[in-house]
Amino acid sequence: MAFILTEKRDSTGIITLNHAEKRNALSETLIEEITAALEGFRALDIRAVVLRAQPGIKVWSAGHDVNELPVRGRDPLGWNDPLRILIRSLQEFPAPVIGLIEGSVWGGACEAAMACDILIATPEATFAITPAKLGVPYNLGGLMTLINMIPLPIVKEMLFTAQPLPAEQALNLGIINYIKPNDEIESFVLDMAQRISGNSPLSISSMKDSLRLLSSAHAVTPDLFEKIQGMRRIVYDSEDYQEGIRAFREKRMPKFPGK
Ligand code: LCV
């Protein structure tokens, strides 16, 4: 069964998340379909991509498929894990990716949305970054994506409270580019994609990649990297992590032992 729909409209490629029964959770299968669609778009001279969910959806994506998180003793957000592959494929795609956001966005799906180049949301859209709800230690690259997009006090509030940020606040903070009503957002996004497609794809792809490289250019020494990885390992080896996954599976609130 296809967990996404794809469409080509002139020089715009549209990817629609289409696994509503699992709230478009970012499973390995769904992510493989997205990355394959992006590869296919490269061959079709696509000059702008729209990443969306089904029109009128209540949950844009519930984030990482929790059932695919490793049970114990392995970094849940390692370089080769599907979510990291998805983030890189969006950031490295040569043409701009416009995120069309309707509904609530959770966990790693927030980072996937923020890995898009331009974000346009409906007024009801919300963004909740939730590793603290699961006892997950977010990874270095993911934190970089967030602090490149969101002022640090807001990143801390979102990570520590795991509460949804409303679209209006996201707009005021410059996290999203526009808020558009449900009945206007699709045409607004497609018009923007059309305008982008009329410009030089070579100029745009070199500027997109340069901005990615410049924004990720941070001096992380081996000591600093190993210190952060050591802190993260304590968390993903912890009882907190076990309890977060278990509580999700048992559909109950977690009771974190803090060890
Ligand atoms: C697998 C799911 C999921 C799901 N995975 O519908 O950012 S990090 O570090 O935390 C990272 C590791 C990450 O992204 O973790 C995931 C973070 N996501 C969340 O915390 C959101 C978890 N989901 C929810 O809170 C609710 O599902 C929302 C509020 C999104 C929607 O609630 P609603 O009542 O509409 P259900 O909860 O009933 O979910 C419908 C089906 O989708 C599955 C869920 O298990 C259920 O499946 P069953 O019908 O088989 O029981 N589902 C939802 N989210 N992230 N599966």
Image: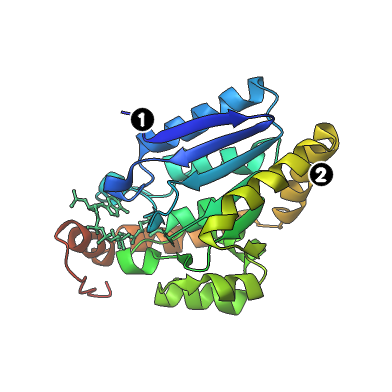
Q: Which quadrant does the C terminus fall into? A: bottom left
The image quadrant in which ligand 1 is located: bottom left
Q: In which quarter of the image is residue 17?
A: top left
Identified by mark 1, the residue type is: Ala
Residue 195, compared with residue 42, is above or below; it is below
Front residue of this view, candidates 165 and 84: 165
> Alpha-carbon distance for marks 1 and 2?
33 Å
Kind of element beneath mark 2: helix
Kind of element beneath mark 1: loop
Residue 49 position in % (x across, y down)? 62, 39
Q: Quadrant of residue 177?
A: bottom right
The residue wearing badge 2 is 207
Residue 173, compared with residue 88, is above or below; it is below
Label pair 1/2, CB-CB below 8 angstroms: no
Q: Any mark on residue 2, and which?
A: 1
Q: Quadrant of residue 219?
A: bottom right
Task: Give the left or right position of residue 240, taking residue 176 as reference.
Answer: left
Residue at 62%, 69% (x, y): give it: 150
Q: Is residue 141 visible?
A: no
Front residue of this view, candidates 58 and 37: 58
Front residue of this view, candidates 191 and 73: 191
- N-terminal of the pair, mark 1 or mark 2, is 1
